[in-house]
Amino acid sequence: MTNIAYYTTVTEYESGWGCRPDGHIVCLSRDNLQNKCREVNSYKGQEFSRTGEIKLCIVTDQMHDKLIKNENGYGWIWTNNSKDWLEQE
C-alpha cells in the first residue's frame, strides 16, 4: 500500500544568529498543510520560521499511522530533520 502525504521544509530565522533548518511539517491533506504554512509564515519578531514549497511524498507506514491517529489534533505533524518518515518524494 502506498501512503501519500504532503510535506514542507521549515527554516528558522533568529536575530543575530542567522537561519537554520527546523524540520518538516507533514500532513495527509494539502489544504490542512497550506493552512499550517500560512500560520507559521505569519509570525514576526526576533525569532520566526518560514515554510518552503509544499511537496507530495510517500511516507512510511509508521508515519502514516501517526498522521491518521494523531495529526496533533490540528491536521499536521512537525518532525525533526531526519527523514525517517519519508519513503519517496
Image (cartoon, helix red, strand yellow):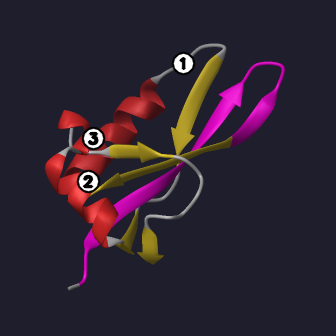
- Residue type at mark 2 is Lys
Closest to the observer: 4 or 19?
4
Q: Which residue is mark 3?
A: 35
In the displayed structure image, the side of residue 35 where residue 22 appears, left or right: right
Q: Secondary structure at mark 1?
A: loop
How packed mark 3 is, by other alpha carbons closer than 10 Å (few <14, some 14-19, many 20 or more), is few
Report x, y in % for residue 77.
34, 45
How packed mark 2 is, by other alpha carbons closer than 10 Å (few <14, some 14-19, many 20 or more), is some
- Residue type at mark 3 is Asn
Q: Main secondary structure of the magenta part?
A: strand
Magenta stretch bounds: 2-20
Q: Is residue 41 above or below residue 6?
A: above
- Residue 44's mark? 1
- Residue 85's mark? none
In the displayed structure image, the side of residue 75 where residue 51 appears, left or right: right
Report x, y in % for residue 24.
49, 50
Q: Which residue is mark 2?
A: 66
Report x, y in % for residue 82.
58, 57
Q: Secondary structure at mark 2?
A: helix
Report x, y in % for residue 22.
60, 41
User: Does label 3 or label 2 sit earlier along the sequence?
Assistant: 3
Closest to the observer: 57 or 52?
57
How packed mark 1 is, by other alpha carbons closer than 10 Å (few <14, some 14-19, many 20 or more), is few
User: Does label 3 or label 1 sit earlier along the sequence?
Assistant: 3
Q: Are marks 1 and 2 in contact (CB under 8 Å)?
A: no
